[in-house]
Image (tube, grey):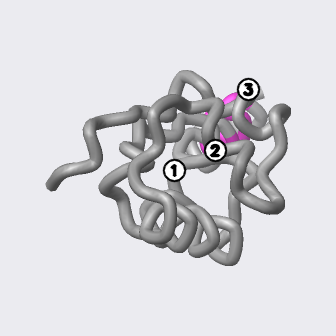
Amino acid sequence: MKRLTTAAALFLLALSPMSFAGQVDINTADAETISTELNGIGLAKAKAIVEYRKKHGPFRSAEDLSLVKGIGERTVEKNRADIKVSSGKK
């Protein structure tokens, strides 16, 4: 029984970093940070976010992420709590 409890605790600890993403400012973060912190956004999509931001200026809301090709409303919704939007100035 003790082995099972230990195994379950180790499993939960292993999942912890994946379960709890931190907030990320989509107007200042680099592609690596965006891909690490937002669920369902890999490095290629994160690079597309950064390129869109460079071309069109800062995002005004989390919903604006859906203007980036490959980012849908569902992705925005599941990451809403982790998306921060600043004025875009570092």
Magenta segment, prevailing SS (helix, strand or loop): helix
Dividing the picture into quarters, in which one does residue 12 lie?
A: top right
Residue linked to disc 1: 37
Cβ atoms under marks 1 and 3 closer than 8 Å: no
> Is 65 a magenta residue?
no
Instruction: Determine whether, in the image, residue 47 is placed left or right of residue 70.
Output: left
Relative to 23, say whether 57 is above or below.
below
Give the amino acid type for the residue marked by disc 1 in the picture: Glu
Image spot of residue 44 (x, y percent) = 69, 77
Which secondary structure, mark 1?
helix
Which secondary structure, mark 3?
helix
Crowding at dot 1, Cα within 10 Å, few <14 / some 14-19 / many 20+, comes out as: many
The span from disc 2 to disc 1 (Cα, nearest Å) is 15 Å
Which stretch is magenta? 5-11
Relative to 86, say whether 33 is above or below.
below
Residue linked to disc 2: 65
- Residue at image x 79%, y 61%? 69
Give the amino acid type for the residue marked by disc 2 in the picture: Leu
Which secondary structure, mark 2?
helix
Crowding at dot 3, Cα within 10 Å, few <14 / some 14-19 / many 20+, comes out as: few
Front in this rendered view, residue 76 or 63: 63
Give the amino acid type for the residue marked by disc 3 in the picture: Glu
Residue linked to disc 3: 77
Q: Nearer the viewer, mark 1 or mark 3?
A: 3
